[in-house]
Amino acid sequence: MDEVLMDGPVEKLTQVEPEVAWLDAQQLDAWKQLMGLIMTLPVALDTQLKRDAGLNLFEYHVLASLSAAPQATLLMSDLAEQSLGSLSRLSHAVSRLERAGWVERRSCGGAGRRTEARLTEKGRQLLRRTAPGHVREARRLVIDALTCDALQALGEAAGQVVAATGLFSAELMGRNRSGDR
Amino acid sequence: MDEVLMDGPVEKLTQVEPEVAWLDAQQLDAWKQLMGLIMTLPVALDTQLKRDAGLNLFEYHVLASLSAAPQATLLMSDLAEQSLGSLSRLSHAVSRLERAGWVERRSCGGAGRRTEARLTEKGRQLLRRTAPGHVREARRLVIDALTCDALQALGEAAGQVVAATGLFSAELMGRNRSGDR
DNA sequence: AAAGATTGACAGATCAATCTTG
DNA sequence: CAAGATTGATCTGTCAATCTTT
């Protein structure tokens, strides 16, 4: 079985492509496991949350980010960063959450069309009810499935990948380097 | 800033919930990095593939799985497993790929409504053109962003998470345990 | 005009229902 | 009828265009 996934086509490339180094067997194996993770874990987490609370993972993150903020309130653009999503994705999500009565919007002064989102009491209650089941799933799939060291290593590596994408500010994800604070 | 994400609400639970152990600071940090990874990496890979080849990551996996199979042909249900997706998701995806002329369906005898998918020559060419850019992105974001050891650790951990979800057969993901074969 | 946010059209995923063949 | 696959409705995310406020 000649894999033509990441170790390259069998035939020589005659492309303009500036020569890529294909992956060796070890790298390829790690890559496949990682693809398994990203195709699998979000689905599993979404499924549990949707079943038990009618939320998806992103919406959960939105509620959780708000609940952690002073006044349970955050500017939309800050909330987007905290929740690891685009502003557009957030805006749609908040519309849904607002419709359900879990979040409220409030436009506030300042440059641009500044808007704050606030977690309602009803939203806080939902989160309180939902968190235990979510944590249980997190433990089952990840935390308790790995040794302490393996979990640390996973976290470290994940952090470096996120940094490499450049999609979210380093400070946001920060606070994990060994022994600080 | 009292986080109410995974370390639990500040107030005591008065739920029927059978007591969950909240995450400690280290676990929480690893979890957050992991969430960063799964919200971030698929988006980055999809973006590159869509821009350069009009494919998303799942469709790429479908083509790649076929190209690695004998006769570049696979039963739909086997292809779904190989590509890490549901049968329904696959069916929709193959319809698109077929419309574009990259894959062909062919119903074949046997129990149920057995159908084989085959990579066309045109599909193989697309994959050949597309692979280098995808590998380059994989290197940039993951392979070359980590030390060799960190990558191995990431792969190992990812494999165990996939196993914990139970979503894909162990044999499928297998072949990575230390030193076998 | 620039920052901040929303919108609508469209592509893709999921779920439940349905179809097909042995 | 059971295994295998498809379908359609519905929901979510993305992208580009647009709106609003300073």
Image (cartoon, coloured by chain):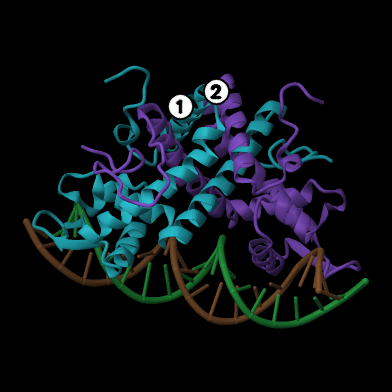
Chain colours: A purple, B cyan, C brown, D green
Helix or strand or loop: what does disc 2 sit on?
helix
**Badge 1 sits on which subunit?**
B
Q: Is residue A32 above or below residue A109?
A: above
Q: Quadrant of the N terminus of chain A?
A: top left
Q: Position of residue A111 (x, y in %)?
A: 88, 67
One can see residue A55 in this view? yes
Tell me the quadrant of the picture where the C terminus of chain A can be found: top right
- Residue under label 2, please give it: A150
Residue identifier under label 1: B156
Task: Give residue B82's position: percent from left, percent from top.
Answer: 30, 44
Give the answer, above or below, for where A24 lies relative to A121.
above
Residue neighbourhood size for the residue with mark 2, other residues' Cα within 10 Å, grouped as few (<14), some (14–19), many (≥20): some
The alpha-carbon separation of the residues under discs 1 and 2 comes to 8 Å
- Residue B18 can be seen in this image: no
Residue type pointed to by label 2: Ala
User: Is the residue marked by circle 1 packed among few (<14), some (14-19), or many (20+) residues within 10 Å?
Assistant: many
Check contact, mark 1 vs mark 2: CB within 8 A: yes
B83 and C3: which is toward the camera: C3
Q: Position of residue D1 (x, y in %)?
A: 18, 57
Q: Residue at x 71, y 27 (%)?
A: A177
